[in-house]
Amino acid sequence: VRLGIGDDCALLCVKPGEEIAVTTDFSITGRHFELAWHPPEAIGHRVLARGLSDLAAMGARPLAAFLSLGVPAELVRGGSARSGKPGRQSRPGQQCWIDRFYNGLLALAGEFHAPLAGGDLSESPIAAADIVLLGAVPQGKALLRSGARTGDAIYVTGSLGGAAAGLALLKGLAGTQKTSAAVGLKIPRKFEAALARHLYPQPRVRQGLWLSKRGVATAAIDLSDGLSTDLHHLCDESGVAAEVNADALPISAGATLMQALHGGEDYELLFTARPGARVPRKIAGVPITRIGSVTRRSTKRPVVTLVTPAGGEALEALGWEHFA
Ligand SMILES: [Mg+2]
């Protein structure tokens, strides 16, 4: 970022030979988060994590983030909702919802070198955040959904189902506390670890960069909607089918097989590689697990087959719409 917030536009520089990856994600209360449940820091973190995860899936290096935010007036107490200046700090101990939202977002932005380089803030009847992420990737090196070929092996980073298990736990907590829209639930310390995968997902930016730099992956997608749905997307774009071995799935501690298959919001990467490719057990500290194979597409077989000891069955795309 050569010029950030303060002028009419931000100015960005890329290195010669790079192309720009752009992604936009809209998060809205009641659908992507609940003001009465989610701590404001977690909402800010999750808004940015969604965009960073899309950059990760393309193997792009984050350049900058741009955020348009609409919030009800009562969440901006202590400052003007019309100042249009994100990142404003209030006195310690007096942080309102929007300060805490930015704290969560900016902490993640700092970690992944994705500075907030512009945006807009407006009073709105409901809370909604639209984030734009820009990234850079060497020309022709971006990981695409369309490159998987018959015979490729299918891998995932990290573990699956933890976000859905965390959401179920959060829903349970909501039934035990009086909640306020301005602060979300109070998270008891003993639940912090079990909720972390849902509240503070870690986008796999370093793993995506590693894969694009080494040219190991033939195709990739991030797991935002759930393995069953996102694997269908990848198969459709590549014109192939897939078999997933249920026994091989790295299921998060405390999660079920159904949550791992359909839960969504894990923000892990799913990628394919040629059968002989050297795929390490870990990339940048995150385990890599082979979960299946790419097969030839045929009208006689399901697009995605789940293989269990009992045999093969069609794995339908049942990714959750969490608050729908
Ligand atoms: Mg995506």
Image (spheres, grey):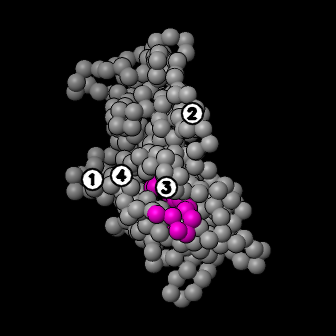
Question: Number of callouts in the render?
Answer: 4
Three-letter residue code for mark 2: Glu
Dividing the picture into quadrants, the one containing residue 46 is top left
Q: Which residues are magenta?
A: 260-278
Residue 192 is tagged as 1
User: Which mark sits nearer the N-terminus, 4 or 1?
Assistant: 1
What is the residue that sits farthest to the top in this orientation? 7
> Can the viewer see residue 194 in this picture?
yes
User: Which mark sits nearer the N-terminus, 4 or 3?
Assistant: 3
Residue ID at (53%, 27%): 14
- Marks 4 and 3 close (CB-CB < 8 Å): no
Dividing the picture into quadrants, the one containing residue 44 is top left
Q: Which residue is mark 2?
A: 18
Q: Position of residue 97 (x, y in %)?
A: 36, 31
Nearer to us: label 1 or label 2: 2
Task: Find the distance from the CA under tag 4 to the CA under tag 1.
Answer: 24 Å
